[in-house]
Each structure stands twice: as C-alpha cells, then as structure tokens.
Image (tube, rainbow, N blue to C red):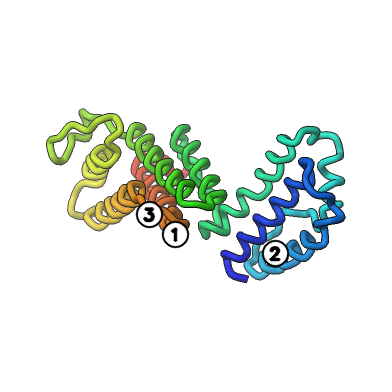
Amino acid sequence: MTTHELVEGLNQIRDLMVSVSTGGPRIQDVDERYQRTYARISAALAAKGITNPITYGSLWDWYGRWSSGDLPSYQSRRTFVSNLFTPLLNRIQTGKEQEYKLTGWERVDRTVGEIRNRLAAAENEEQFQAVGLLCRDGLISLAQAVYVRSEHPPLDGTEPSITDANRMLESYIAVEMKGDANEELRRYAKASLRISNALTHSRTADFRSAAICVDATTTTINVIAILAGKRDPK
C-alpha cells in the first residue's frame, strides 16, 4: 500500500467513525466496508513498523466507546476522532518519526503544532496554501522571539519591520554564527530560511510543496533554537 493509499484509507475510516456517531448511516450498512479498510490499514501500518492507535476493529466497537457516557455530543465525538487520527496522519504524510521538540517560545511552538495538524488534514490547494501562510507566521514569531536590534544590525542597512522575518533572522544568524569556522553552518541555516521563505510565498500549493515548506520551517526553527541555547543539555 502506497502512502497515498494509506492516507486515503485512514481518511475513509475516520469519516465513517464520525458519520455513524453523528446521525449518519446505520452501522450495519457500512460496517463491512469499514472492517475491510481497517484490516488493510492495520497491515500497512504494521509493515511500516507503526503501532496502530485506532483500536476499533469494527464500528460496533466504536459504538461501545462513544455511547459509554463521556462523549455525549456530536462535537465531542468529532473532536475525539480528530485527536485520534491527526497525529497518525501527520506522521505518515510528513515522514516524521519523532515529535517536534518544544522550544519554550510559546507562540512558535503553538504555531508549529497547528502547522503539522493543518498539513495532516489538508486536501485541496487552498488548504495547502493555508499551511504555507502558517509557516510564514511561525517564522515571524521566531524572528520576534530572538531578534534584538542593538545586537543584530540589519545586513543591508534597511530597518526590518516587525514582520520582516527574513531580515531579522539573517541578521541574527550573521551575528550568532560569525567567523570563518561557522561559514558552512551559516550557509545551512540561510538555505533553510530561503527555502521556507520561497515556499511560503508560493501560489501553486500541493501536498509536496506544503510538506517541504513545513520541513524547512521546522529546520529553521530548530537551528535558531540551537543558537539560542534552547537545545542545550540540562
């Protein structure tokens, strides 16, 4: 099963779980289809070495869970299912085997979490573009967290605005990684930043461009977090 097929299958069983628990079709009418898809997905996840977090092998199993009393409303059931599927879809679609390590910059971390969730759920051009815009917001928040004008003068003499993430971060990198010994590291950090910036302004959005944008943005955040001492051993 390809990654695309696996994602489609997960979306199918997610949608069936939501629909039968929110006034949609009767379980007996769609449970056979659910079980067939569930079995294929479980096998594909096992082949990838991924533990299947969805423990409901049939929609009757899911019925037993949602009718137990703590998911009384349609919205509570939708939220429960979303929280169950989103991390798994995010892991599969982005190829990330590890969770994002928090930086301690609250707004940056919150935006990264939203970026990853949006990428996992995105299905059309507008939604992929929204991922790019969130990546841009994440870089702006990152720049605002570390840039100090008196310590990081602009490289081209142009004063950066409060949303000019590119100028602020390039100035920060130039100061915090100065010296010949850090030339390659500066190139790496600037390359990640350039990729992030280029993709956040792209008007031709699809999954691949959005996923690359997320990866480049996260890389830039991790590089700056290291420079700022956020990854130092404690």
Q: Position of residue 19 (x, y in %)?
A: 74, 46
Q: Position of residue 221 (x, y in %)?
A: 39, 45
Report the side of 208 relative to 38 (left or right).
left
**Label 2 vs label 3: CA separation?**
31 Å
| Separation of residues labelled 3 and 1 (CA atoms) | 11 Å
Q: Which residue is mark 1?
A: 208
Vertical position of residue 231 compared to residue 184: above or below = above
Characterize the local packing of mark 3: few (<14), some (14-19) or many (20 or more) Cα atoms within 10 angstroms. few
Which one is in front in this view, the residue at disc 3 or the one at disc 1? 3
* Residue at the image point whose x is 41% and y is 56% from the top: 209
Which residue is under mark 2? 41
Res. 57 image quadrant: bottom right
Q: Nearer the viewer, residue 167 or 2?
A: 2
Of circles 2 and 3, the one toward us is 3
Q: Amino acid at mark 1?
A: Arg
Question: Does 205 sit left or right of 160 as displayed?
Answer: right
Give the structural element (helix, strand or loop) at label 2. Answer: helix
Residue type at the position of mark 3: Thr
Q: Secondary structure at mark 1?
A: helix
Looking at this view, is 193 or 201 the one in front?
Answer: 201
Report, in whole angstroms, how far the alpha carbon at label 1 lies from the one at label 2: 22 Å
Identified at 56% across, 52% down, the residue is 90
Identify the residue at horizontal 34%, vertical 43% (top origin).
227
Asked if residue 160 is positioned above or below residue 39 in the image, the reply reads: above
Name which residue type carries label 2.
Ile
Name the residue carrying label 3.
204
- The one of 179 and 72 positioned closer to us in this rendering: 72
Report the front residue among 187 and 175.
Answer: 187
